[in-house]
Image (cartoon, helix red, strand yellow):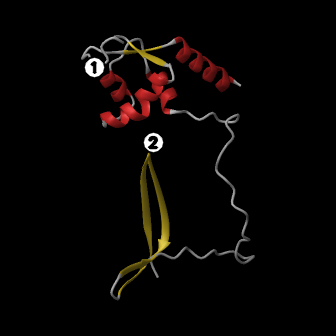
């Protein structure tokens, strides 16, 4: 019985995640429906199978590792006045709507950044700059990373 590599890829808010798992060859059948059955690798151990343990949640408390939100990622990249296109490019994002919904609007609504031309939000010369509240968030983050 051979084995094959199952590759699972997912796009998340924080980027792309890839997981590779080596499994025995899947079993295929086509009796009215197409079915593929993937079986886990058998556990080989001198003591027999490993005991079943309760699930451990992968979450880490915020006190240990503060989550880097999209707004904070945006703040970390914001230098002086930057256009939407420059910010989006610095984050490595191509989808304008995703950038606007996930990064730009939350940072604006939280008061972490502001428009350079607030009276003309659709101006082609529109830029964004960090606010005192945004500076405070960055300073707090910097202080937390030193501890």
The residue under label 2 is: 13
Residue 4 is drawn in which quadrant? bottom left
Residue 68 coordinates in the image, percent (x, y)? 55, 33
The residue under label 1 is: 122
Mark earlier in primary sequence (2, 1): 2
Q: Is residue 31 above or below residue 116?
A: below
Q: Is residue 130 left or right of residue 53?
A: left
Residue 97 coordinates in the image, percent (x, y)? 32, 35
* Residue 131 - label: none
Residue appearing at x 45%, y 26% in the figure: 74
Q: Is residue 36 above or below residue 107?
A: below
The foreground one among 55 and 97 is 97
Residue appearing at x 43%, y 59% in the figure: 8
Residue most extreme to the bottom: 31
Decide: marks 2, 1 in contact (CB < 8 A)?
no
Residue appearing at x 26%, y 14% in the figure: 125
Residue appearing at x 64%, y 50% in the figure: 58
Residue 93 coordinates in the image, percent (x, y)? 35, 35
Residue 15 is drawn in which quadrant? top left
């Amino acid at each position: 019985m051979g084995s094959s590599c199952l590759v699972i890829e997912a796009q998340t808010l924080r980027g792309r995640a890839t997981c590779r798992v080596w499994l025995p060859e899947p079993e295929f059948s086509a009796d009215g429906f197409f079915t593929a059955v993937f079986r886990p690798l058998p556990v080989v151990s001198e003591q027999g199978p490993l005991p079943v343990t309760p699930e451990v949640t992968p979450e880490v408390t915020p006190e240990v590792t503060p989550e880097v939100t999209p707004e904070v990622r945006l703040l970390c990249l914001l230098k002086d006045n930057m256009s939407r296109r420059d910010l989006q490019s610095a984050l490595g994002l191509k989808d304008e709507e995703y950038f606007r919904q996930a990064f730009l609007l939350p940072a604006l609504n939280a008061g972490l950044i502001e428009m350079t031309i607030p009276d003309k939000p659709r101006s082609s010369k529109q830029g964004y700059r960090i606010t005192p509240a945004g500076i405070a968030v960055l300073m707090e983050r910097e202080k937390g990373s030193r501890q």
